[in-house]
Amino acid sequence: MASQVKRPGPKAETFTQRLFRKSFKDPLVPIGCLLTGGVLGGGLYTLYTGQAGLSQKFMRARILAQGVTVVVLCTGTVLMGNEAMKGGPRETLEQKMLRERMEDRQHKQAAAAVAAAAAATKAS
């Protein structure tokens, strides 16, 4: 069984960093979520205060806002999928592992060459 070298992975991003990154990538989804939540809150408040007719209008507006948010989310997903397909075939895990092994060998050979050159200059 081949030994496995543990490589330090990319730094994990926090929840807020991920939220901001994804919000900048597709800003209409968080806007739609906030709009839906605001309309829902308004509808519940009017229901609590006894304004049933206005509450009903708020709930209809909430359904509309929620539908628009889902449509925007689906559209963004499809567009990102199409964008990913333009990049060509993706690298398989096996190809990635082979590439990393080759890079490791190249780094080791380069380090050995540098060490040999340093030893040769010390000897002279």
Image (cartoon, grey):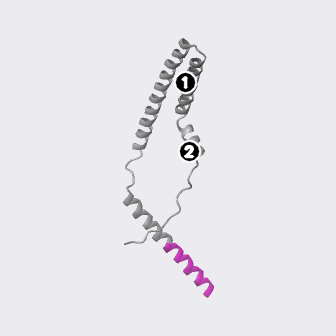
Around disc 2, counting alpha carbons within 10 Å, would you say few (fewer than 14), some (14 to 19), or many (20 or more)? few
Res 98 quadrant in image: bottom left
Q: Which residue is mark 1?
A: 40
Q: What x and y, as percent, mark residue 67?
A: 46, 25
- Whether 100 is drawn above or below 85: the answer is below
Q: Residue furthest bottom?
A: 123
Residue identified by numbered label 2: 18
Q: Position of residue 43 (x, y in %)?
A: 56, 20
Taking depth in this image into account, of 69 and 115 the one nearest to the observer is 69
Residue at x 59% of width, y 41% of height: 20
Q: Secondary structure at mark 2?
A: helix
Which element type, helix, strand or loop, lies under badge 1? helix
Q: Is residue 30 visible?
A: yes
Q: Predominant secondary structure in magenta?
A: helix
Please give the label number shown on residue 78. Answer: none
Residue beneath the point at 48% across and 21% down: 64
Q: Quadrant of residue 41?
A: top right
Residue 9, position in %: x, y? 52, 59
What's the amino acid at mark 1?
Leu
What's drawn in magenta, residue-wise?
108-124
Q: Tell me where residue 84 sits by quadrant.
A: top left
Residue 113 magenta: yes
Compared with residue 109, is residue 120 higher up or lower down, i.e. above or below?
below
Q: Can residue 71 be found in the magenta stretch?
A: no
* Distance (Cα) linking label 1 and label 2: 26 Å
> The disc labelled 2 sits on which kind of residue?
Arg
Name the foreground residue: 61 vs 97.
61
Q: Can residue 124 be seen from the camera position used here?
A: no
